[in-house]
Image (cartoon, rainbow, N blue to C red):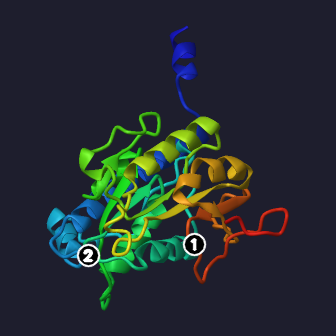
Amino acid sequence: MANDADDSLTLSADALAALTEFYAERDAQTEKLEMLKARVGSDDPRGEDAGEKAREAGDGSAAPELSIHTFTEDWNESQFWYSDETANLLANQLLDGTSDDSVVAVVSTPSVFVALRKITAATGYTGPKPKTYLLEHDYRFAVFPEFVFYDFASPFKLPAYLKGAVDRMICDPPFLSDDCQTKMAMTLRWLAHTPTPKTTTTTPPPRVLICTGERMSALVNRLYAPLGVRTTTYEPVHSGLKNEFCCYANFECAAWRWKAEPSGEIRA
């Protein structure tokens, strides 16, 4: 009987190999995040001394390149990273027209945040470096000092200094539900700065970008109407997700125009 019990608790060779691989991947991911934390926390914003930090740690390896792919997509969190092309395009639209005094909020869109960080830290970059915050539920991104924990279920549970202070914002609601979309819209409207009659000529309204499923179009246009958001012609691309996605914005640019209404007219 004892032997039977021991046999029932013994993993097969295949199961043991799979478990070993799982733990190895987990440990490698943890190590990468620790090295990335050292890199982004260094005095050099590009983290060029991170290799030295890694060598001091004793493994002689180089720090990982700043990349969204350092973070494994968590499908339970509904995480699907944008392609590099999409992330860079959206990041550049957030940067356009900003200054060092501008405030950018990246809400549940970490791939765009990483793209922003890479663009502004690149060698030779001379453009604006606005104050940027990543509002995110996944604590892995707390390796970045700009991380602010955010749960859409509590749309206003955020630092008071962000209220009405944001000049550029983007969000990609994690779930295609009315509840998630509505609460995130409440957050963005809370974040958005509102120009007063005295500042309208000197302070333009905030730029707002929403990326979410095409089937949420009617709701998104209704929720963000006070911010002037409309459906655009641009379709964000993900590395793996194949759902029909749309980009909604309150401005037009070289990358997109507003979509015509079914009647063929552009909504005014």
Q: Is residue 120 above or below residue 212?
A: below
Residue 186 in the figure: left or right of residue 65: right
Pinpoint residue 67: horizontal percent, then vertical percent: 42, 69
The local crowd at label 1, few if under 14, some if 14 to 19, many if 20 or more residues have their Cα within 10 Å, is many
Pinpoint residue 125: horizontal percent, then vertical percent: 32, 88
Type of residue at label 1? Thr
Residue 166 in the figure: left or right of residue 41: right
Residue positioned most to the right: 263
Secondary structure of residue under mark 1: helix
Disc 2 marks which residue?
A: 100
Disc 1 marks which residue?
A: 86
The answer to which quarter of the image holds residue 128 is bottom left
Query: Which residue occupies the foreground of this view, 15 or 122?
Result: 122
Visible residue check, residue 13: no
Query: Which residue occupies the foreground of this view, 157 or 63?
Result: 157
Pinpoint residue 136: horizontal percent, then vertical percent: 40, 49
Q: Given contact means CB atoms under 8 Å apart, are the residues at marks 2 and 1 in contact? A: no
At 35% from the left edge and 71% from the top edge, which residue is drawn? Answer: 203
Q: Quadrant of the C terminus?
A: bottom right
Query: Distance from label 2 to label 1 (Cα)?
Result: 24 Å
Residue 257 in the figure: left or right of residue 71: right
Residue 92 in the figure: left or right of residue 161: right
Q: Tell me how many marks there are.
A: 2
Which numbered mark, 2 or 1, is in the foreground of this view?
Answer: 2
At 32% from the left edge and 68% from the top edge, which residue is drawn? Answer: 199
Q: Is residue 199 above or below residue 171?
A: below
Residue positioned most to the top: 1
